[in-house]
Image (cartoon, helix red, strand yellow):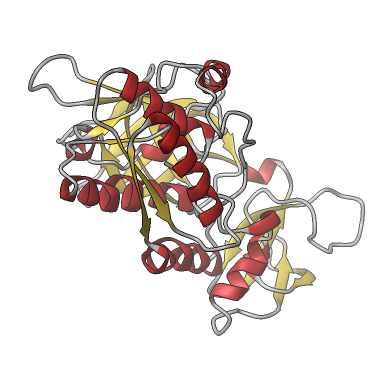
Amino acid sequence: MSGGVDSSVAAALLAEQGHEVIGVTLHLAGSQSRCCSLDDADDARRVADRLGIRFYVANYKERFREEVMLPFADAYLAGRTPIPCIACNQRFKFHHLLERARALGATAVATGHYARVEQDGPGSPPRLLRGRDAAKDQSYFLFNLASEQLRHIRLPLGGLFKAQVRAKARELRLATAEKPESQELCFVPDGKYAQRVEELRPGSLPGEGAVVDADGRVLAHHAGIHHFTVGQRRGLGIPGTERQFVTRLDAGQNRVVVGSARDLEVRGARLEKVSWTATLTPREPLRARVQIRYRHAGVEGVVSPDCEGGAEVSFDEPVRALSPGQAAVFYAGEELLGGGWIAGPLP
């Protein structure tokens, strides 16, 4: 229970269904956090009291720093654009929390994610599906959960729309019914990503470097590649009126490479650390709709797994601003098939 309306209603729905529900808040990112802070734990406790369920707070601040926050900073310093929410889900909500649930005698973990887990019959592998509310669907963030983890996950909000969740919270007079939700990373106050990287890794900052075009001509200078992401247009410091975009981050040379909007378009991607929701990796290329970032609409393409746990994706039409460090997730209709981490464009 993060202290928000979604996890509050998830707990309430399960309690209404007759399950024995235990509320747990993971204290993760400290006083600056916009999620899972001690204030959020107080909100979650009030909801648990209202529902008449047991409630615990588990302190995972040090593990969160080591497993999520520091890798986030390291990724930016390596010229990548990380998604720490995926690591948080996998490591904390569906690994550490599942371990704690078992210690408490529970058989499953439930969260307020807008996604669905279904099985076609007893003994069949679980399938991960998009949430019914397309505007809130969060299946993208769960792409790397193992089949065994999916068997022990309950997602009560998967078939609901956000408005229904708010209405249910008001009906039950939950303390979080009107609580706003944050669209920012919980441990990055006010969206100041570069500042957070500098706080986390003060001794590893690359310093000033060059902003160059595709031919290597120096156009400007920058204060560190962790200030930039692929597709960025503002803050490049380049004189003139022609619109330029970040097309690549070269961490080895500490350079920001820029080009035109057309230079951002690619027809394929190299992926690493690919996960499949089924237990077996496909042996043959398969067609899927591929989503290269959370709010991307997705594009049809062919995914070709390799023997080293990676894959290549060929898109039917160009995609824009492919960013190393983001996830490419594969869907067949509403079903999530798998996904992997973007290493770069195909040559």
Q: Is residue 3 above or below residue 71?
A: above
Q: 126 left or right of 144?
A: left
Residue 110 x, y percent position in the rendering: 32, 34
Compare residues 238 and 8 and report the one nearer the observer.
Answer: 8
Q: 24 left or right of 292?
A: left
| Residue drawn at point x = 53 percent, y = 17 percent | 171
Give residue 199's quadrant in the image: bottom right
Compare residues 4 and 138 and report the one nearer the observer.
Answer: 4
Residue 347 visible? The answer is no
Give residue 328's quadrant in the image: top left
What is the quadrant of the N terminus in the image? top left
Q: Is residue 275 above or below residue 73?
A: above
Residue 243 x, y percent position in the rendering: 83, 48
Compare residues 14 and 195 and report the one nearer the observer.
Answer: 14
Compare residues 340 and 116 and report the one nearer the observer.
Answer: 116
Residue 323 visible? The answer is yes
Q: Is residue 122 above or below residue 192?
A: above
Please give the count of numbered marks on the rendered protein: 0
* Outermost residue, left side: 123
Q: Is residue 58 above or below residue 221?
A: above
Residue 141 x, y percent position in the rendering: 42, 39
| Residue drawn at point x = 66 percent, y = 58 percent | 189
| Residue drawn at point x = 67 percent, y = 72 percent | 224
Residue 76 x, y percent position in the rendering: 55, 64
* Outermost residue, bottom side: 203
